[in-house]
Structure formats: structure tokens, C-alpha cells
């Protein structure tokens, strides 16, 4: 059995990629490890999805439903309850290993792979909080899943570390379900979540946000259950300031301290990494340096808006299809894309001048909040394009679309934001 | 005095300013204007939550108010939804509670419940 394209993951990204590749006429198989399609959207029952794509505001499950219906309509082959465990490069493509309770371990070959595996949450292991290691310290996303899918509240008195969107959404959600949400602490002097979530999740319910604060101590009771925490203000170097200690009696500490693209499947392939996005490098076709390996959605870069995930993955599906048709083995003609000093990162990392895709969608995040800025795109110190952007914050990804004809094929392309 | 709001109608989150003469600036689209006007007089929100079901495969189903409801009724409406149990298969979009607390808003399913 050989497929033209295998999509790994059936969230917003995998659905959109599979649909667009299938519409291009490709033979597609989608593999999803959960028992349903939709991915993280299934537990995001709040509003705020789809304004760009559908011009209407949906909840996560409603947004997923639109794509799942479209997916069914296109008669795309798919497997549920099947986890991909290995991706190996072979001649003319890849060998994919997956395991499922129904079929056991199986292998299938394919010309191209689209990675749409989403992201995972940073846990306590990835930061250091001194003190006990009690029950009751859990990631905000797991708490969201327990509450919204299983109907189970993880605690009564809650504090939240990190102001990422999941944390903010969960502050409101648990407050409305009757929990006592005592506050949110954020290490940075600004929030990491969308501004609208600060307004409608915290301000609406007078839940305090402690900026430039972190949890410096967790204490357990004799049953190993969380009993209290101490938070402290931090200085510019993020060191706790003595004398600013605040004590909170809580049974639950939710961690909303960041998301990391899930690319563990690529460990055995020689894929070039980007330490900024914590994922891999791509060209404008979402193709990695391993030819035939495409990646999009949250496994490529953590997105704040699902609309961008869908649009990006749709493009990746088309590019993967073009690749299968032309089976490009010709040498890439890559020019680097470089993030200037005020940008955290830019994708794509390369523009391939031998590629079919002439459209380049640059996506980037700023390092800090900038009220008024000018986006400048240049090559060899010459300005290619500029655009004014107001209110840029790291929490919101920005983008600009340009045609390859704007660029020459011999110099680095540099993007930066100038503060006005 | 100029009052500043963050428009929450869409994720763009424009900062919208209103001065004493009700001049509204900063919104990137018209909806920002009406948002600020209701926010000044009678703030409204959409509620999204879950309702209990009798089904093991799907113990909770997500629901929402189909139009925004007055902010001060949020807790009352949460209480009513928490007292309801879905005991038959229902489709996405179907009405679970109609015209809740006479607000003109229906509580509808945002996910299909075994249908
Ligand atoms: C709490 C929260 C709030 C959000 N709020 C908003 C909002 O208000 N508005 C908005 O527009 N966006 C919001 N987003 C963002 C948006 O929902 C996500 O960016 C988007 O849904 C991600 O889609 P994805 O397909 O990349 O990842 P996912 O949905 O995570 O999908 C990845 C899928 O891959 C599967 N998978 C992983 N590994 C394997 C494997 N080895 N084998 C098989 N399958 C595998 C997983 O099971 C999963 O189904 C929010 C996200 C979160 C987490
Ligand atoms: S003013 Fe318009 S664009 Fe700006 S946040 Fe409100 S709805 Fe969105």
C-alpha cells in the first residue's frame, strides 16, 4: 500500500491540509491518535474562532464541525485511535509506522508527509519552583480537558501561573463554575495572552493579574495535596524581590507557561531545527530540508488564531500536492530569511527560488510591545517593502504576503520592525 | 475625559477611545463602535459553558447563548444551565433552553450530542 500524502494529526491543521491536498486530486490518508477529529478545538468551548475564515464568531467545537463536515464531504481516507510512532525516510518517500488497538502495529509508505501534530504544554519540569511536589499542580490545558470534556473540576481554590490564553480562559471558566480564582501571576511585565482575554476573562470578574510576578514556593499538606503558594515580584532580571511575598491558600495551581511544537516524531530524521520556534525550518512551501516532509499548524509554530492555522495548512496541502506531482529532486535555490533585532522569529526560514510557490507568507512575532512601528523588509540593505503596523505585541503573530518577484535570489531577506 | 476600551468583539482587540463628545476612534471596523456604545450603557456577553448529559460516551456537551446576554445575568444563567441535563441525542445548533430569563437569547448546543 502506498499513499501520495499522509497527514499526521486531525486537528484544525491536519483537516485543512488534507482537504486542500485532496481537492488538488491527491490520494490522502489522515492519521489521528484520538477517537475523534478536531484536536484541541474540542476542548476550547469558548468563543473567538473563525472570524477571518467564516466572518462569524464560533466556539472551538463549532469551528471544528465546519471543517470536519467538509472533510467528510471530500471522502478523505482517515484512521482514528491510531498513533504514528515513526517516520523513516526511504527511497521515493517515507515509511510511516502507526499503532492502534484495532489493527496493532502497521506500516504504510507515502510520497509526502504533512506534520500537523500540534503542540504540547510546558510543565513544571521545564521551570523551577522550589518547594514540595504536591498533587494539584497541573497544566491549564489538562484542567480544561477534564472540565470541558469529562465534566470534572480539578479544584476549588485556584491560582494560575502564566498569562497565556489557556490560563486566562480557564480563570473565567473555573470562576463561572464556582471556583475561587485568586489571581494570575505573569513573569513578564506584559501579558502573553490576547488583550481581549485579559478584558473578558479577568477584568470582567475582578480576577487580579500580577505582572512581573512569579510563584516562588509551593507547599503541600500531609496528604501531599497543594495547600498554599507564595508569589513574589521580580526585577528586570526576573529575580524575586525580597519583601514582596504574597501568600495564597489554594488547592490548585494551573500552569499556563507556554506551548511547544510537538515534533518528537522527527527525532530520527535529519531535519534542520529552529531554536526560536522550537520547531523545524521550512521554505515558503512549508517544506523542510528533508524533501517531501511538510509541516504546518501548531507543530510548525504556536498560533494564537485558528484561522491562521487553517489558512497556513491549506497552503501547505497545495504545496505538498505540487511536490508529489513534480517530485522535485532538483537542487533547492535557497535564500535565507533573517529576523531583525526586534523580532523573535520569522517563518519561512528560506525562500526557495526553484520552488513552484511564488507566494510567500511571512509570519513573525515581535520581541516587545511596540505602539507604532514600521515593518521593513530588505535585501542587501535596500528596502524591498515597508508597512505600518500599530500595537504589535509578542502575543499576537503578524504576517505579510509578498510575491517572490519582489526579491533577488542572491541576498538574505531581512525583516524587522522599526519603532516609530 | 477620554475613556479607553479594548474591543473584545474579535481577537484583533482594538483599543477604542471615546471622548466627552462621544467621538469614537481607534476601532478598525464598525463593530467596535457599537461595542463601545453598549459597553457604556448596558454591557453584554456571550456565555459559553457545558451541560451535563446522561450519556457515558459524552458526559458533557458544550453550549452557548446564541446572542449576548446582559452581563449582570451571567451567574443566574450559569445556574440554570447547570441544572439542565441533556437526555436525548441532539444536533449541533439545536436549542436546549429557549429565551432564557426573557433575554431573547437561546441556549444552543455547540457540539452535536450523539446525533
Ligand atoms: C486554550 C486555547 C485557546 C485558544 N483560543 C483561541 C481563540 O480564542 N481563537 C482562535 O482563533 N484560536 C484559539 N486557539 C488556537 C487554535 O485553537 C489552535 O492554534 C489550533 O486549533 C491548533 O490546531 P493544530 O491542528 O495545529 O493542533 P491540534 O488541534 O493540537 O491538533 C493536533 C492533532 O494531532 C494529533 N496527533 C499528535 N501527535 C500524533 C501522532 N503521533 N499520531 C497521530 N496523531 C497525532 C493530536 O491528537 C491532535 O488531534 C486556542 C488554543 C488553545 C489551546
Ligand atoms: S473594532 Fe472591529 S476589528 Fe477591532 S477588535 Fe473590534 S471587532 Fe475587531
Image (spheres, rainbow, N blue to C red):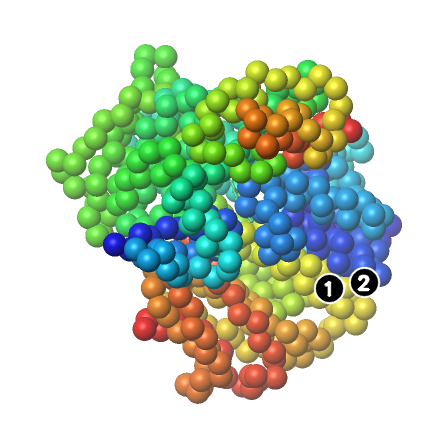
- The residue wearing badge 2 is A24
Q: Nearer the viewer, residue A149 or A119?
A: A149
Image location of residue A282, percent across then percent down? 58, 65
Given the current orientation, which residue lies at the most extreme top position? A222
- The residue wearing badge 1 is A318
Q: Nearer the viewer, residue A224 or A229?
A: A229
Residue A386 in the figure: left or right of residue A131: right
Given the current orientation, which residue lies at the most extreme left position? A243
Give the quarter of the image for residue A3: bottom right
In the displayed structure, B9 sits above or below A291; it is: above
- Say if mark 1 contacts mark 2, CB within 8 Å: yes
Give the Cα distance between marks 1 and 2: 7 Å
Report crowding for label 2: few under 14, some 14 to 19, many 20 or more residues within 10 A (C-alpha). some
Query: Quick one: SS at disc 2?
Result: loop
Image location of residue A116, percent across then percent down? 64, 50
Residue at (65% x, 67% y) in the render: A285
Quadrant in the picture for the N terminus of chain B: bottom left
- Is residue A257 shown to the viewer in this render? no
Query: Quick one: SS at disc 1?
Result: helix
- Chain letter, disc 2 residue: A
Residue A416 in the figure: left or right of residue A352: left
Residue at (72% x, 47% y) in the render: A67
- Is residue B90 shown to the viewer in this render? yes
Image location of residue A9, percent across then percent down? 67, 45
Query: Reading the chain from its start, which is encountered first: label 1 or label 2?
Result: 2
Residue at (81% x, 63% y) in the render: A24
Amino acid at each position: 500500500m502506498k499513499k501520495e500524502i499522509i497527514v499526521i494529526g486531525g486537528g484544525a491543521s491536519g483537516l485543512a491540509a488534507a482537504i486542500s491536498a485532496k481537492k488538488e486530486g491527491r490520494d490522502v490518508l489522515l492519521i489521528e491518535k484520538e477517537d475523534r477529529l478536531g484536536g484541541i478545538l474540542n476542548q476550547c468551548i469558548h468563543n473567538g474562532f473563525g472570524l477571518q475564515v467564516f466572518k462569524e464568531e464560533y466556539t472551538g467545537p463549532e469551528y471544528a464541525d465546519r471543517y470536519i463536515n467538509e472533510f467528510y464531504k471530500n471522502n478523505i481516507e482517515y484512521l482514528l485511535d491510531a498513533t504514528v510512532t515513526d517516520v523513516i525516510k526511504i527511497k521515493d518517500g517515507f515509511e510511516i509506522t502507526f499503532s492502534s488497538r484495532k489493527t496493532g502495529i502497521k506500516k504504510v509508505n507515502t510520497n509526502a508527509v504533512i506534520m500537523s501534530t500540534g503542540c504540547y504544554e510546558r510543565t513544571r519540569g521545564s521551570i523551577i519552583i522550589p518547594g514540595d511536589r504536591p498533587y494539584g499542580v497541573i497544566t491549564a490545558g489538562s484542567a480544561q480537558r477534564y472540565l470541558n470534556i469529562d465534566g470534572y473540576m480539578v479544584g476549588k481554590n485556584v491560582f494560575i501561573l502564566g498569562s497565556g490564553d489557556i490560563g486566562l480562559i480557564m480563570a473565567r471558566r473555573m470562576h463561572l463554575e464556582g471556583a475561587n480564582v485568586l489571581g494570575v501571576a505573569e513573569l513578564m511585565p506584559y501579558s502573553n495572552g490576547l488583550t481581549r482575554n485579559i478584558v473578558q476573562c479577568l477584568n470582567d470578574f475582578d480576577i487580579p493579574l500580577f505582572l512581573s510576578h512569579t510563584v516562588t514556593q509551593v507547599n503541600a499538606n500531609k496528604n501531599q495535596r497543594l495547600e498554599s503558594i507564595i508569589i513574589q515580584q521580580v526585577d528586570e532580571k526576573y529575580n524575586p524581590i525580597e519583601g514582596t511575598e504574597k501568600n495564597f491558600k489554594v488547592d490548585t495551581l494551573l500552569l499556563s507557561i507556554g506551548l511547544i511544537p510537538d515534533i518528537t516524531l522527527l527525532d530520527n530524521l535529519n531535519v534542520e531545527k529552529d531554536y526560536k520556534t522550537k520547531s523545524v525550518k521550512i521554505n515558503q512551501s512549508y517544506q523542510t530540508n528533508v524533501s517531501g516532509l511538510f509541516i504546518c499548524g501548531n507543530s510548525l509554530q504556536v498560533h494564537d488564531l485558528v484561522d491562521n492555522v487553517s489558512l497556513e495548512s491549506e497552503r501547505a496541502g497545495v504545496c505538498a500536492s505540487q511536490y508529489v506531482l513534480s517530485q522535485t529532486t532538483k537542487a533547492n535555490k535557497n535564500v535565507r530569511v533573517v529576523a531583525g533585532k526586534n523580532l523573535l522569529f520569522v517563518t519561512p526560514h528560506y525562500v526557495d527560488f526553484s520552488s513552484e510557490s511564488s507566494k510567500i507568507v511571512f509570519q513573525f512575532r515581535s520581541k516587545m510591545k511596540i505602539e507604532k512601528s514600521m515593518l521593513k523588509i530588505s535585501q542587501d540593505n535596500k528596502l524591498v517593502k515597508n508597512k505600518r503596523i500599530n500595537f504589535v505585541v509578542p502575543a499576537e503573530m503578524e504576517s505579510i504576503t509578498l510575491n517572490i518577484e519582489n526579491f533577488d535570489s542572491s541576498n538574505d531577506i531581512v525583516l524587522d520592525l522599526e519603532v516609530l | 475625559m477620554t475613556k479607553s476600551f479594548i474591543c473584545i468583539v474579535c481577537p484583533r482587540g482594538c483599543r477604542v477611545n471615546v471622548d466627552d463628545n462621544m467621538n469614537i476612534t481607534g476601532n478598525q471596523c464598525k463593530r467596535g463602535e457599537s461595542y463601545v456604545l453598549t459597553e457604556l450603557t448596558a454591557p453584554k456577553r456571550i456565555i459559553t459553558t457545558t451541560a451535563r448529559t446522561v450519556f457515558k460516551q459524552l458526559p458533557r456537551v458544550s453550549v452557548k447563548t446564541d446572542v449576548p446576554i446582559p452581563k449582570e445575568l451571567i451567574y443566574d444563567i450559569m445556574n440554570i444551565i447547570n441544572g439542565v441535563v441533556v437526555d436525548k441525542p441532539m444536533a449541533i445548533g439545536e436549542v436546549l433552553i429557549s429565551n432564557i430569563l426573557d433575554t431573547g437569547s437561546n441556549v444552543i448546543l455547540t457540539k452535536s450530542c450523539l446525533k
